[in-house]
Image (spheres, grey):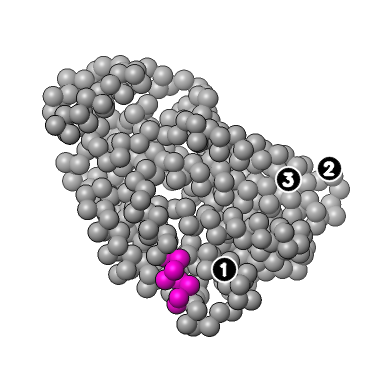
Protein backbone atom coordinates (compact mmCIF):
# COMPACT_ATOMS: atom_id res chain seq x y z
CA UNK A 1 0.00 0.00 0.00
CA UNK A 2 2.85 2.36 0.85
CA UNK A 3 4.57 1.73 -2.49
CA UNK A 4 1.54 1.75 -4.77
CA UNK A 5 -0.71 4.27 -3.03
CA UNK A 6 -3.57 3.03 -0.86
CA UNK A 7 -6.47 3.12 -3.39
CA UNK A 8 -4.39 1.69 -6.26
CA UNK A 9 -2.84 -0.83 -3.90
CA UNK A 10 -6.24 -2.27 -2.97
CA UNK A 11 -7.17 -2.55 -6.65
CA UNK A 12 -3.86 -4.23 -7.49
CA UNK A 13 -4.33 -6.67 -4.63
CA UNK A 14 -7.65 -7.84 -6.06
CA UNK A 15 -6.13 -7.98 -9.55
CA UNK A 16 -3.16 -10.11 -8.48
CA UNK A 17 -5.47 -12.45 -6.58
CA UNK A 18 -7.65 -12.88 -9.69
CA UNK A 19 -4.59 -13.58 -11.86
CA UNK A 20 -3.36 -16.11 -9.28
CA UNK A 21 -6.72 -17.89 -9.27
CA UNK A 22 -6.75 -18.04 -13.07
CA UNK A 23 -3.14 -19.18 -13.48
CA UNK A 24 -3.47 -21.96 -10.87
CA UNK A 25 -6.40 -23.40 -12.79
CA UNK A 26 -4.50 -22.87 -16.05
CA UNK A 27 -1.63 -25.00 -14.75
CA UNK A 28 -3.85 -27.97 -13.96
CA UNK A 29 -5.59 -27.61 -17.33
CA UNK A 30 -2.15 -27.61 -18.96
CA UNK A 31 -1.27 -30.75 -17.03
CA UNK A 32 -4.45 -32.42 -18.25
CA UNK A 33 -3.74 -31.41 -21.87
CA UNK A 34 -0.16 -32.69 -21.73
CA UNK A 35 -0.81 -35.75 -19.59
CA UNK A 36 1.67 -34.61 -16.93
CA UNK A 37 1.35 -34.50 -13.15
CA UNK A 38 3.97 -31.95 -12.06
CA UNK A 39 4.96 -28.40 -12.91
CA UNK A 40 8.38 -29.55 -14.08
CA UNK A 41 7.09 -32.33 -16.32
CA UNK A 42 4.52 -29.93 -17.82
CA UNK A 43 7.22 -27.42 -18.79
CA UNK A 44 9.55 -30.20 -19.91
CA UNK A 45 6.94 -31.60 -22.30
CA UNK A 46 5.99 -28.11 -23.54
CA UNK A 47 9.37 -26.42 -23.93
CA UNK A 48 11.87 -29.26 -23.63
CA UNK A 49 14.91 -29.57 -21.41
CA UNK A 50 15.91 -25.85 -21.47
CA UNK A 51 12.47 -24.88 -20.15
CA UNK A 52 12.71 -27.65 -17.57
CA UNK A 53 16.03 -26.28 -16.28
CA UNK A 54 14.72 -22.71 -16.17
CA UNK A 55 11.65 -23.71 -14.18
CA UNK A 56 13.77 -25.86 -11.86
CA UNK A 57 16.00 -22.86 -11.15
CA UNK A 58 13.00 -20.62 -10.40
CA UNK A 59 11.33 -23.21 -8.17
CA UNK A 60 14.61 -23.74 -6.34
CA UNK A 61 15.23 -20.01 -5.85
CA UNK A 62 11.75 -19.15 -4.56
CA UNK A 63 11.85 -21.03 -1.22
CA UNK A 64 15.58 -20.36 -0.97
CA UNK A 65 15.28 -16.57 -0.93
CA UNK A 66 12.73 -16.53 1.90
CA UNK A 67 14.09 -15.01 5.10
CA UNK A 68 12.77 -17.24 7.93
CA UNK A 69 13.03 -14.73 10.74
CA UNK A 70 13.01 -11.06 11.61
CA UNK A 71 13.48 -11.09 15.39
CA UNK A 72 16.24 -8.69 16.31
CA UNK A 73 16.90 -9.49 19.95
CA UNK A 74 19.07 -12.61 19.86
CA UNK A 75 17.71 -13.37 16.41
CA UNK A 76 20.74 -15.46 15.35
CA UNK A 77 20.44 -17.76 18.35
CA UNK A 78 16.67 -18.07 17.92
CA UNK A 79 16.95 -18.88 14.21
CA UNK A 80 19.59 -21.57 14.74
CA UNK A 81 17.79 -23.24 17.66
CA UNK A 82 14.33 -23.14 16.05
CA UNK A 83 15.71 -24.45 12.76
CA UNK A 84 17.52 -27.38 14.39
CA UNK A 85 14.67 -28.20 16.76
CA UNK A 86 11.59 -27.74 14.59
CA UNK A 87 12.19 -26.73 10.97
CA UNK A 88 14.68 -29.46 10.07
CA UNK A 89 12.69 -32.40 11.55
CA UNK A 90 9.49 -31.20 9.85
CA UNK A 91 11.34 -30.72 6.56
CA UNK A 92 12.37 -34.40 6.55
CA UNK A 93 8.81 -35.55 5.73
CA UNK A 94 8.59 -37.19 2.30
CA UNK A 95 4.80 -36.93 1.96
CA UNK A 96 3.38 -33.42 1.58
CA UNK A 97 -0.06 -34.60 2.74
CA UNK A 98 1.38 -35.14 6.24
CA UNK A 99 2.09 -31.41 6.45
CA UNK A 100 -1.61 -30.54 6.09
CA UNK A 101 -2.40 -30.36 9.82
CA UNK A 102 0.77 -28.37 10.42
CA UNK A 103 -0.29 -25.87 7.78
CA UNK A 104 -3.70 -25.58 9.43
CA UNK A 105 -2.02 -24.54 12.70
CA UNK A 106 -0.14 -21.89 10.74
CA UNK A 107 -3.44 -20.59 9.35
CA UNK A 108 -4.91 -20.30 12.85
CA UNK A 109 -1.86 -18.35 14.03
CA UNK A 110 -2.17 -16.04 11.01
CA UNK A 111 -5.72 -15.24 12.12
CA UNK A 112 -4.42 -14.36 15.60
CA UNK A 113 -1.78 -12.05 14.07
CA UNK A 114 -4.47 -10.39 11.98
CA UNK A 115 -6.52 -9.78 15.13
CA UNK A 116 -3.50 -8.12 16.77
CA UNK A 117 -2.90 -5.85 13.76
CA UNK A 118 -6.58 -4.87 13.71
CA UNK A 119 -6.54 -4.16 17.44
CA UNK A 120 -3.51 -1.90 17.13
CA UNK A 121 -5.07 -0.08 14.17
CA UNK A 122 -7.77 1.10 16.58
CA UNK A 123 -5.65 1.69 19.69
CA UNK A 124 -2.35 2.87 18.14
CA UNK A 125 -3.36 4.36 14.79
CA UNK A 126 -4.77 7.66 16.14
CA UNK A 127 -1.45 8.32 17.94
CA UNK A 128 0.76 7.98 14.85
CA UNK A 129 1.22 11.14 12.72
CA UNK A 130 -0.02 10.77 9.15
CA UNK A 131 2.26 11.53 6.21
CA UNK A 132 1.11 14.23 3.82
CA UNK A 133 0.95 11.89 0.80
CA UNK A 134 -0.87 9.15 2.70
CA UNK A 135 -4.04 9.16 0.59
CA UNK A 136 -2.79 9.81 -2.95
CA UNK A 137 -4.36 7.43 -5.47
CA UNK A 138 -1.14 6.07 -6.98
CA UNK A 139 2.62 6.21 -6.44
CA UNK A 140 5.48 5.48 -8.89
CA UNK A 141 6.56 2.28 -7.08
CA UNK A 142 3.38 0.38 -7.96
CA UNK A 143 5.26 -2.29 -9.95
CA UNK A 144 7.36 -3.11 -6.88
CA UNK A 145 4.11 -3.49 -4.98
CA UNK A 146 2.90 -6.01 -7.59
CA UNK A 147 6.07 -8.02 -6.94
CA UNK A 148 5.38 -8.14 -3.20
CA UNK A 149 1.72 -9.06 -3.82
CA UNK A 150 2.82 -11.82 -6.20
CA UNK A 151 5.04 -13.17 -3.45
CA UNK A 152 2.04 -13.20 -1.11
CA UNK A 153 -0.06 -15.30 -3.48
CA UNK A 154 2.53 -17.59 -5.10
CA UNK A 155 1.81 -21.27 -4.52
CA UNK A 156 2.17 -22.54 -8.09
CA UNK A 157 5.29 -24.54 -7.29
CA UNK A 158 3.13 -26.57 -4.88
CA UNK A 159 -0.06 -26.87 -6.89
CA UNK A 160 0.59 -30.24 -8.59
CA UNK A 161 1.73 -31.72 -5.27
CA UNK A 162 -1.47 -30.53 -3.58
CA UNK A 163 -3.62 -31.55 -6.56
CA UNK A 164 -2.13 -35.04 -6.46
CA UNK A 165 -2.83 -35.33 -2.72
CA UNK A 166 -6.60 -34.87 -3.23
CA UNK A 167 -8.72 -38.00 -2.75
CA UNK A 168 -10.46 -37.53 -6.11
CA UNK A 169 -8.39 -35.04 -8.15
CA UNK A 170 -10.47 -33.46 -10.91
CA UNK A 171 -10.21 -30.07 -12.62
CA UNK A 172 -13.71 -29.13 -11.39
CA UNK A 173 -12.85 -29.97 -7.78
CA UNK A 174 -9.55 -28.11 -8.11
CA UNK A 175 -11.39 -25.01 -9.38
CA UNK A 176 -13.69 -25.02 -6.34
CA UNK A 177 -10.74 -25.37 -3.95
CA UNK A 178 -8.76 -22.60 -5.66
CA UNK A 179 -11.70 -20.18 -5.79
CA UNK A 180 -12.35 -20.66 -2.07
CA UNK A 181 -8.67 -20.48 -1.08
CA UNK A 182 -7.97 -17.34 -3.10
CA UNK A 183 -11.12 -15.65 -1.79
CA UNK A 184 -10.09 -16.29 1.82
CA UNK A 185 -6.49 -15.26 1.08
CA UNK A 186 -7.39 -11.95 -0.55
CA UNK A 187 -9.79 -11.17 2.32
CA UNK A 188 -6.98 -11.69 4.84
CA UNK A 189 -4.50 -9.70 2.70
CA UNK A 190 -6.88 -6.75 2.34
CA UNK A 191 -7.47 -6.66 6.10
CA UNK A 192 -3.73 -6.84 6.82
CA UNK A 193 -2.91 -4.17 4.24
CA UNK A 194 -5.72 -1.83 5.25
CA UNK A 195 -5.17 -2.04 9.01
CA UNK A 196 -1.39 -1.85 8.71
CA UNK A 197 -1.39 1.09 6.33
CA UNK A 198 -4.12 3.01 8.17
CA UNK A 199 -2.02 2.72 11.33
CA UNK A 200 1.34 3.88 9.93
CA UNK A 201 0.60 5.38 6.44
CA UNK A 202 3.88 6.53 4.85
CA UNK A 203 5.95 5.20 7.75
CA UNK A 204 5.03 1.59 6.89
CA UNK A 205 8.12 -0.62 6.69
CA UNK A 206 8.76 -3.64 4.48
CA UNK A 207 8.19 -5.80 7.56
CA UNK A 208 5.11 -4.43 9.33
CA UNK A 209 6.33 -5.69 12.70
CA UNK A 210 9.25 -3.25 12.49
CA UNK A 211 6.74 -0.42 12.89
CA UNK A 212 5.61 -1.49 16.35
CA UNK A 213 7.47 -0.58 19.52
CA UNK A 214 9.43 -3.20 21.42
CA UNK A 215 7.57 -2.38 24.63
CA UNK A 216 4.27 -3.52 23.08
CA UNK A 217 3.66 -6.92 24.69
CA UNK A 218 0.66 -7.75 22.50
CA UNK A 219 2.70 -7.21 19.31
CA UNK A 220 5.59 -9.18 20.80
CA UNK A 221 3.19 -12.09 21.11
CA UNK A 222 2.24 -11.48 17.46
CA UNK A 223 5.92 -11.66 16.49
CA UNK A 224 6.13 -14.99 18.30
CA UNK A 225 3.10 -16.28 16.39
CA UNK A 226 4.64 -15.08 13.14
CA UNK A 227 7.86 -16.97 13.90
CA UNK A 228 5.85 -20.14 14.52
CA UNK A 229 3.97 -19.74 11.22
CA UNK A 230 7.27 -19.48 9.34
CA UNK A 231 8.61 -22.57 11.13
CA UNK A 232 5.47 -24.52 10.19
CA UNK A 233 5.28 -23.21 6.61
CA UNK A 234 8.92 -23.48 5.56
CA UNK A 235 8.93 -27.32 5.36
CA UNK A 236 6.45 -27.13 2.45
CA UNK A 237 8.80 -24.80 0.59
CA UNK A 238 11.74 -27.05 1.41
CA UNK A 239 9.72 -29.98 0.04
CA UNK A 240 9.55 -28.28 -3.37
CA UNK A 241 13.23 -27.32 -3.39
CA UNK A 242 14.21 -30.88 -2.51
CA UNK A 243 11.94 -32.30 -5.20
CA UNK A 244 13.51 -30.04 -7.83
CA UNK A 245 17.01 -31.25 -6.95
CA UNK A 246 15.85 -34.86 -6.73
CA UNK A 247 14.24 -34.68 -10.18
CA UNK A 248 17.23 -33.03 -11.83
CA UNK A 249 20.04 -35.06 -10.27
CA UNK A 250 18.51 -38.27 -8.85
CA UNK A 251 15.73 -39.11 -11.27
CA UNK A 252 13.06 -38.11 -8.77
CA UNK A 253 13.62 -40.87 -6.20
CA UNK A 254 16.70 -40.41 -3.98
CA UNK A 255 17.54 -42.95 -1.31
CA UNK A 256 16.74 -42.28 2.35
CA UNK A 257 20.34 -41.32 3.06
CA UNK A 258 20.48 -38.82 0.19
CA UNK A 259 17.04 -37.53 1.21
CA UNK A 260 18.33 -36.68 4.69
CA UNK A 261 21.60 -35.20 3.41
CA UNK A 262 19.80 -33.12 0.80
CA UNK A 263 17.31 -31.78 3.35
CA UNK A 264 20.06 -30.86 5.81
CA UNK A 265 22.03 -29.04 3.10
CA UNK A 266 18.99 -27.05 1.90
CA UNK A 267 17.85 -26.05 5.40
CA UNK A 268 21.39 -25.17 6.48
CA UNK A 269 22.03 -23.02 3.42
CA UNK A 270 18.71 -21.18 3.82
CA UNK A 271 19.43 -20.65 7.52
CA UNK A 272 22.82 -19.11 6.73
CA UNK A 273 21.13 -16.70 4.32
CA UNK A 274 18.54 -15.72 6.95
CA UNK A 275 21.28 -15.05 9.50
CA UNK A 276 22.81 -12.47 7.17
CA UNK A 277 19.58 -10.65 6.23
CA UNK A 278 17.46 -8.51 8.54
CA UNK A 279 15.41 -6.58 5.97
CA UNK A 280 12.32 -8.46 4.88
CA UNK A 281 11.16 -5.83 2.37
CA UNK A 282 13.94 -6.31 -0.19
CA UNK A 283 13.58 -10.10 0.16
CA UNK A 284 9.88 -9.91 -0.68
CA UNK A 285 10.50 -7.58 -3.62
CA UNK A 286 13.29 -9.62 -5.25
CA UNK A 287 11.52 -12.90 -4.63
CA UNK A 288 8.32 -11.49 -6.07
CA UNK A 289 9.78 -10.06 -9.29
CA UNK A 290 12.42 -12.75 -9.98
CA UNK A 291 10.52 -15.90 -9.00
CA UNK A 292 6.84 -15.27 -8.29
CA UNK A 293 6.17 -13.19 -11.43
CA UNK A 294 7.48 -15.86 -13.87
CA UNK A 295 5.78 -18.68 -11.94
CA UNK A 296 2.42 -16.87 -11.82
CA UNK A 297 2.25 -14.78 -15.00
CA UNK A 298 4.67 -16.08 -17.62
CA UNK A 299 5.15 -19.85 -17.48
CA UNK A 300 1.50 -20.97 -16.98
CA UNK A 301 0.41 -18.69 -19.83
CA UNK A 302 3.16 -19.86 -22.16
CA UNK A 303 2.43 -23.54 -21.48
CA UNK A 304 -1.30 -23.16 -22.01
CA UNK A 305 -0.90 -21.12 -25.22
CA UNK A 306 1.35 -23.79 -26.71
CA UNK A 307 -0.74 -26.79 -25.62
CA UNK A 308 -4.31 -25.56 -26.09
CA UNK A 309 -6.21 -26.04 -29.35
CA UNK A 310 -8.90 -23.52 -28.37
CA UNK A 311 -9.56 -20.65 -30.84
CA UNK A 312 -7.65 -17.40 -30.31
CA UNK A 313 -10.81 -15.66 -29.21
CA UNK A 314 -11.34 -18.10 -26.32
CA UNK A 315 -11.36 -16.34 -22.93
CA UNK A 316 -8.54 -18.43 -21.50
CA UNK A 317 -6.28 -17.68 -24.47
CA UNK A 318 -7.00 -13.96 -24.34
CA UNK A 319 -6.18 -13.88 -20.63
CA UNK A 320 -3.01 -15.87 -21.19
CA UNK A 321 -1.93 -13.47 -23.97
CA UNK A 322 -2.38 -10.56 -21.56
CA UNK A 323 -0.70 -12.21 -18.58
CA UNK A 324 2.49 -13.17 -20.39
CA UNK A 325 3.72 -9.66 -21.41
CA UNK A 326 2.47 -8.14 -18.15
CA UNK A 327 4.54 -10.68 -16.22
CA UNK A 328 7.61 -9.84 -18.29
CA UNK A 329 7.20 -6.13 -17.55
CA UNK A 330 6.72 -6.76 -13.82
CA UNK A 331 9.81 -8.99 -13.76
CA UNK A 332 12.18 -6.62 -15.59
CA UNK A 333 10.96 -3.23 -14.35
CA UNK A 334 10.31 -4.53 -10.84
CA UNK A 335 13.86 -5.88 -10.55
CA UNK A 336 15.37 -2.58 -11.68
CA UNK A 337 13.22 -0.60 -9.24
CA UNK A 338 13.91 -3.00 -6.36
CA UNK A 339 17.65 -2.44 -6.81
CA UNK A 340 17.51 1.32 -7.39
CA UNK A 341 14.84 2.22 -4.80
CA UNK A 342 14.39 -0.54 -2.20
CA UNK A 343 11.88 -0.34 0.64
CA UNK A 344 12.73 1.44 3.88
CA UNK A 345 14.33 -0.73 6.54
CA UNK A 346 15.04 0.19 10.17
CA UNK A 347 17.46 -2.74 10.71
CA UNK A 348 15.79 -3.37 14.05
CA UNK A 349 15.96 0.21 15.36
CA UNK A 350 12.95 1.68 17.12
CA UNK A 351 10.72 4.04 15.14
CA UNK A 352 10.76 7.68 16.27
CA UNK A 353 7.26 7.59 17.77
CA UNK A 354 8.33 4.89 20.23
CA UNK A 355 10.36 7.39 22.26
CA UNK A 356 8.51 9.13 25.14
CA UNK A 357 9.73 12.58 24.07
CA UNK A 358 7.81 12.29 20.79
CA UNK A 359 4.38 11.79 22.34
CA UNK A 360 3.42 15.33 21.32
CA UNK A 361 3.62 14.40 17.63
CA UNK A 362 0.16 12.85 17.60
CA UNK A 363 -1.61 15.47 15.54
CA UNK A 364 1.30 16.40 13.26
CA UNK A 365 1.57 15.90 9.52
CA UNK A 366 5.00 14.58 8.58
CA UNK A 367 6.88 14.47 5.31
CA UNK A 368 9.32 11.73 4.28
CA UNK A 369 12.24 14.17 4.82
CA UNK A 370 11.13 14.82 8.38
CA UNK A 371 10.81 11.07 8.95
CA UNK A 372 14.36 10.47 7.70
CA UNK A 373 15.73 13.25 9.92
CA UNK A 374 13.87 11.99 12.97
CA UNK A 375 15.01 8.40 12.41
CA UNK A 376 18.61 9.55 12.02
CA UNK A 377 18.46 11.52 15.28
CA UNK A 378 16.83 8.57 17.02
CA UNK A 379 19.47 6.15 15.79
CA UNK A 380 22.22 8.59 16.83
CA UNK A 381 20.83 8.85 20.34
CA UNK A 382 20.72 5.06 20.61
CA UNK A 383 24.31 4.81 19.43
CA UNK A 384 25.42 7.43 21.95
Residue picked out by circle 1: 245
Q: Check if mark 3's residue and mark 1's residue have beta carbons within 8 Å.
A: no
Between residue 119 and residue 341, name the one nearer to us: 341
Q: Earlier along the polypeptide chain: callout 3 or callout 2?
A: 2
Give the labeled residue for mark 3.
Answer: 320
Q: Dot 3, crowdedness within 10 Å: few (<14), some or many (≥20)?
A: many
Q: How far apart are the alpha carbons under marks 3 and 2?
A: 11 Å
- Residue 275 pos. (x, y %): 34, 54
* Rendered image quadrant of residue 204: top left
Instruction: Give how far across and how far down residue 127 sits, in percent.
Output: 23, 26
Quarter occupied by residue 31: bottom right
Q: Is residue 115 left or right of residue 47?
A: left
Q: Is residue 372 left or right of residue 67?
A: left
Q: Is residue 261 magenta?
A: yes
| Residue 353 seen | no
Residue at disc 1, secondary structure = helix
Q: Is residue 349 above or below residue 54?
A: above
Q: Which residues are magenta?
A: 260-267
Q: Quadrant of residue 25?
A: bottom right
Q: Secondary structure at mark 3?
A: helix
Tell me where residue 69 appears, x and y as whole percent. 34, 53
Q: Quadrant of the N terminus?
A: top left
Marks 2 and 1, the one that precedes in the sequence: 1
For label 2, count other residues whose C-alpha is less than 10 Å away and answer few (under 14), some (14-19) or many (20+). Answer: few
The nearer-to-camera label among 3 and 2 is 3
| Sequence-earlier tag: 3 or 1 | 1
Main SS class of the magenta portion in the image = helix
Residues at marks 3 and 1, CA–CA distance in whole angstroms: 29 Å
Residue 8 visible here: yes
* Residue 313 - label: 2
Amino acid sequence: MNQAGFPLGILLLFWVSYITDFSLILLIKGGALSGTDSYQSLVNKTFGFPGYLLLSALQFMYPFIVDPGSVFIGRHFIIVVSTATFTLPLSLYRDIAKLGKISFISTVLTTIILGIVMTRAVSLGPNIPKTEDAWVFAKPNAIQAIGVMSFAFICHHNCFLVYGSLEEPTVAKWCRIIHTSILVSVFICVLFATCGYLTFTGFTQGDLFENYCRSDDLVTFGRFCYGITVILTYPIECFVTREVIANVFFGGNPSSVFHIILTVVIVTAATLVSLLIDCLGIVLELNGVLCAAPLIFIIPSACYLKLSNEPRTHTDKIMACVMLPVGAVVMVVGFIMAITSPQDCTHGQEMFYCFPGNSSLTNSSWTHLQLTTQLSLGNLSIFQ
